[in-house]
Image (cartoon, rainbow, N blue to C red):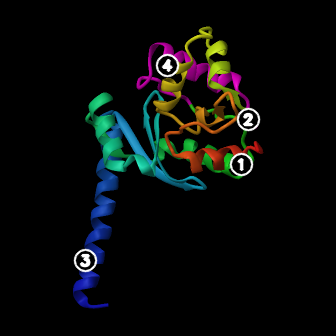
Amino acid sequence: MSGLDEAYEASDSHLERLLGRLVGEADGRGEVDVGYRTVDGPVGRLLLAATPAGLVRVAFASEGEDAVLQELADRVSPRVLPLPGRLDETARELDEYFAGRRRRFDVALDWQLSSGFRRDVLTHLAVDVAYGRTTSYAGLATLSGSPRAVRAVGTACATNPIPVVVPCHRVVRSDGTMGRYRGGEEAKHALLELEGVR
């Protein structure tokens, strides 16, 4: 390693520590509205984002980290910073889920990216469709109190801001085929297989 490489490496390390300190200080003063981090799992890299109220977004790598961060800045707050500590509990629960040791998530959720009927659908999904089970879009429409709103249920699942934790992967077509999924069909299949659904 040349002296110049060592200088760059030392400079990068110093900048990372400085950034960490500044972000921590900003969070301590209540100046970070959205903290985020990434985690790796069997469905690839996930971006996790949380407000002080709770988990607000889970995004798959295919959604593009920059696009998701911009969405958060536009729809939640422009004060978005890397803040891994805010998401330690979520990361731990996801690790447990991916290892087959967790069937239900306990982290607080911030629903501000979903409202109205879509939020009702996702709430029913999180509460009423258990680990290792699936339901159809029509079944979820019935659970949500609007049995004819099958397309609206599909839209709610397709725009679920907190996939995996709010398990839209458990919703399949009436004929048993997968249907579309925000993280892609492979991710949906992997999550269902992880839960023992064949």
Q: Which residue is mark 4?
A: 118
Tell me if residue 87 can be seen. yes
Q: Which residue is mark 3?
A: 8
| Residue at x 33%, y 53% (from the top left corner) | 21
Q: Residues within 10 Å of mark 4 (few under 14, many from 20)?
A: some
* Amino acid type indicated by mark 1: Leu
Classify 94 as above or below 74: below
Q: Which residue is mark 2?
A: 131
N-term-proximal mark, 1 vs 3: 3
| Residue at x 56%, y 42% (from the top left corner) | 90
Marker disc for residue 106: none
**Which circle, 1 or 3, is nearer the viewer?**
1
Residue sticking out furthest to the front = 175
Tell which of 95 and 187 is nearer to you: 187
N-term-proximal mark, 3 vs 4: 3
Residue 3 percent across, percent down from the top left = 24, 89
N-term-proximal mark, 2 vs 3: 3
Q: Which residues are magenta?
A: 108-132
Residue 92 percent across, percent down from the top left = 61, 47
**Distance Cα–Cα, label 4 vs label 2:** 21 Å
Whether 181 is among the magenta residues is: no
Whether 111 is among the magenta residues is: yes
**Which circle, 3 or 4, is nearer the viewer?**
4
Determine whether, in the image, residue 39 is placed left or right of residue 79: right
